[in-house]
Amino acid sequence: MIEIKVPQLSESVSEGTLSAWKKQPGDRVRRDEVIVDIETDKVVLEVPVSETGVLLEILKNAGESVVSGEVIARVEPVADAEEAPAPSPKTESIQAAPAETIAVASPAARKILAEKNIAAEAVRGTGRGGRVTKEDALSAEIPPLPEAKPPAAPPSPAAAGERLEQRVPMSRLRARVAERLIQSKNENAILTTFNEVNMASVMALRKQHGEKFERAHGVRLGFMGFFVKAVCAALERFPILNASVDGTDIVYHGYADVGIAVGSPRGLVVPILRDASNLSIAEIEKQIVEFGVKAKDGKLSIEDLTGGTFSISNGGIFGSMMSTPIINPPQSAILGIHATKDRPVAENGQVVIRPMNYLALSYDHRIIDGREAVLGLVAIKEALEDPARLLLGV
């Protein structure tokens, strides 16, 4: 008997929630086939089967909470998947389905029954343990077509004007995000300082070298690489922006693990660029593209989302002009960047049009004074307005 257990979760993830089972008791399963997903507050974990066999028993229903190492199902292994035996008689079905109603059919029988549109449970098996054989499937009669029903009547005026509501439970990720936002609001003394940055130099650099960059590195030269490098330069000058609070202690981090807020089908996630200050712009852009693809496909790992000493939120990709980002605990600061738009600005006594981006730095005033926050944001602004400094390290 093989026990299917919950994978080891990280220290920051205490439990998960079972999604819908992809297999039911009596179904044949193959080695490495995923039979259920586990949703945590960070990622969705796939649970595969280690050996080919028959799923005998499900111990946890969809929607239930599980913890690391907990047994959630049992599989009876078989040497040959084509000759998978029926579940042993002692095994009782779960999820309120009587054991005797579960029919196990050979792959050949299942194929024939699928072509006839006949459920395996509707066929009396003559094989060992009631297994449906190929011969049973061939002799099974195709059920008659159901009588056609008259088309549905159009909804009445009262039904058409009905005020509908739908109540659905929060996903574990959404519930965790809500919990952390309230925690951040209640535990941090959050202030936000603003500035504006002229993106003309960065845009000119992208226009001049963008095609060569993409040919050389296989990734598009975006804006985020410059923002990350500018942030890392500011964190080196003002390390308090990269610190965190632990009780009555301030923890200074000698590295910059920068979280990049990314939208996904499950909600907001923040994968981490490890040692971002040691990465080139090309390496940053590549990792951000990888994070975007993994977030879209639900493939981000717990390691991708664990940790972080500073975060960047880019509301500009959705058209946001200004926002006050909220700190991601236990971090103490977060940079919000927004849409770059042509705006009138004053230069040397003249009104000119420049591509401007409004920056917002939210910070925990318990440990970060206004001076460090403002100067840190100015350092980010200056680095972006003269991007050569990022390459020269000055």
Image (cartoon, rainbow, N blue to C red):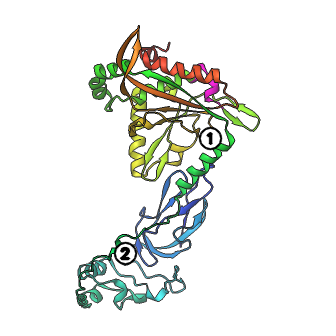
Residue 142 vs residue 172, the one in the foreground: 172
Quick check: 136 left or right of 242? Answer: left
Report the residue marked by disc 1. 329
Residue 197, by quadrant, is top left
Work out which residue is located at the far right of the displayed protein and give it.
Answer: 248
Label 1 environment density (alpha carbons within 10 Å; few <14, some 14–19, many ≥20): many
Q: What amino acid type should be assigned to the residue bearing mark 2?
A: Ala
Residue 86, by quadrant, is bottom left
CB atoms of marks 1 and 2 within 8 Å: no
Q: Main secondary structure of the magenta part?
A: helix
The residues bearing labels 1 and 2 have C-alpha atoms spaced at a distance of 49 Å
- In the rendered view, would you say 32 is above or below 214? below
Q: Is residue 240 magenta?
A: yes
Where residue 345 appears, as percent x and y from the top left, is 40, 18
Report the residue marked by disc 2. 158
Q: Which residues are magenta?
A: 235-243
- In the rendered view, would you say 184 is above or below 321? below
Q: Secondary structure at mark 1?
A: loop
Q: What amino acid type should be assigned to the residue bearing mark 1?
A: Pro
Residue 334 vs residue 231, the one in the foreground: 334
Q: Is residue 353 magenta?
A: no
Where residue 97 appears, as percent x and y from the top left, is 49, 84
Q: Residue at x 44, y 45 (%)?
A: 263
- In the rendered view, would you say 98 is above or below 202? below
Sequence-wise, the earlier of marks 1 and 2 is: 2
